[in-house]
Amino acid sequence: MMRALDWLKELREAHIGPSSKEGTRLGIPSNSELRRWLNKGSVLINGEAPKAAEEIKFPIWQLVFFPTSTKNKTTLK
């Protein structure tokens, strides 16, 4: 098992997932930004919204970033 934040950090290093957008600049999301996304429920893992420090169960079959957004929703299956 692994913490949700640690798993998203590994995905970020593999360039998987959405980019960070601040103003007109795009980039790789910071650790604090990943933590904020998790704690606000902006990331669903297997249909659940874990907090940053929560353990996640494998295998992962679905990852959704920004599930309530119509413009920024990203689903990985």
Image: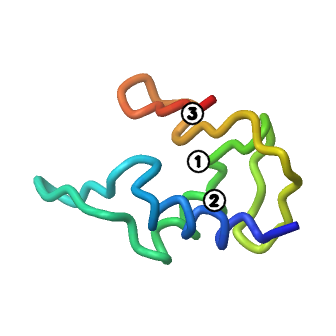
Mark 3 or mark 2, which has the lower sequence index?
A: 2
Q: Residue furthest front?
A: 14
Query: Of the residues tagged 1 and 3, which is closer to the observer?
Result: 3
Dot 2: within a 10 Å radius of its alpha carbon, few (fewer than 14), some, or many (20 or more) residues? many
Residue 36 % position (x, y):
55, 66
Amino acid tagged 1:
Ser
Amino acid tagged 2:
Leu
Q: Quadrant of residue 25?
A: bottom left
Which SS class for mark 3?
A: strand
In the image: residue 31, left or right of residue 71: right
Query: Of the residues tagged 3 and 2, which is closer to the observer?
Result: 3
Question: Is 64 drawn above or below residue 37 in the view shown?
Answer: above
The label on residue 42 is 1
Q: CA distance from mark 3 to mark 2?
A: 16 Å
Residue that mark 2 sits on: 38
In the image: residue 74, left or right of residue 64: left
Q: Residue furthest top?
A: 70
What sort of colour scheme is used for the picture? Answer: rainbow
Residue that mark 3 sits on: 76
Amino acid tagged 3:
Leu
Q: CA distance from mark 2 to mark 1?
A: 6 Å
Which SS class for mark 1?
A: loop
Residue 41 % position (x, y):
66, 50
Dot 3: within a 10 Å radius of its alpha carbon, few (fewer than 14), some, or many (20 or more) residues? few
Check whether the beta carbons of the residues at disc 2 and disc 1 lie within 8 A of each other: yes
Front residue of 24/9: it is: 9
Question: Residue at point 40% right, 47% down?
Answer: 18
Looking at the figure, which quarter contains the N terminus? bottom right
